[in-house]
Amino acid sequence: MQYFQNDMLAGQCAVVTGAARGIGRAIAAALAGAGADIAIVDRADPDMAAETIAQVEACGRKAVFYYGDVTDYTGCEALVKQIVTDFGKIDILVNNAGITKDMLMPQMGEAEFDAVISVNLKGTFQMMRHVSRQMMRKKYGRIVNISSVAGIMGNAGQVNYAASKAGIIGMTKSAAKELAARGITVNAVAPGLVETDMTKNLTDNNGLAASVPLGRMAQPEEVANLVTYLASPMAGYVTGEVIRIDGGLAM
């Protein structure tokens, strides 16, 4: 699988949350391949980000890991300030950090619901809120939020996850309307089944991949290339959009 290979993002700084592995790692590598320096934000052990850092640096770009908990409001504010100090600015924000705690609604407790909403939805808001303030000052920015087809069509056993991802869609559209006049675009990507650690057990157990019209799961790099397009000057007239990348699953 190939990424964009050019300098269309040269000189830009991209913040990618949940970038230590999976889709986040692929997004960080794709943006670096297009010329961006990468601030890797994750609450994983720093050692887990080593491969992401290596992929970014292999593109000749700067990579810095930041331990960050997107559920912490003041922590997010301090994190953004530190990234701006270290990189000079933030041009691109990709809100990818997310978790699942799947179970049927009658068995789902308050803790499982709150945890998923806090990371997936509240975390996206908090990073957008703090990053957009500095983007507004320079009247430029690209924000890409990772939603899911679960937020469009729902999914049994994922009331909490689907609610969080549907919320991201509404938040994306509202933020796009608020920030457009300042030269900031805000879009969402809604993946279907993607081959990552998070989906391995799900797809192994229920065979959902067989229901995808294209007959396979997506590769993380395919999602990353779409994110790179939305983060690039080529998508300067695209805002408030929710783009499915699901092999036709939610048609």
Image (cartoon, rainbow, N blue to C red):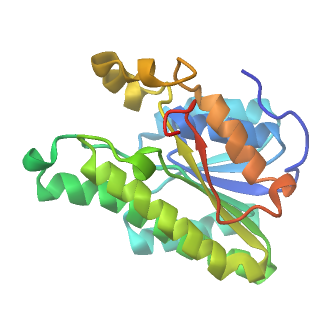
Extreme residue in the left direction: 107
21 and 215: which is toward the camera: 215
48 on left or right of 104: right
Residue at (52, 23) in percent of width and height: 217
Q: Decide: is 248 above or below 242.
A: above
> Residue 52 location, x and y as percent?
61, 34
Residue at (74, 35) in percent of width and height: 57
111 on left or right of 80: left
Is residue 55 in sight in this rendering? yes
Residue at (76, 61) in percent of width and height: 238
Q: Quadrant of residue 123?
A: bottom left
> Residue 36 location, x and y as percent?
79, 48
Q: Decide: is 98 above or below 26.
A: below
Extreme residue in the front direction: 251
Residue at (82, 35) in percent of width and height: 4
71 and 229: which is toward the camera: 229
> Residue 172 location, x and y as percent?
56, 66
Numbered marks: total:
0
> Residue 2 location, x and y as percent?
77, 24
Q: Decide: is 142 above or below 246.
A: below
20 and 5: which is toward the camera: 5
Quarter of the image with the N terminus in it: top right
142 and 76: which is toward the camera: 142
Extreme residue in the right direction: 7
Is residue 69 in sight in this rendering? no
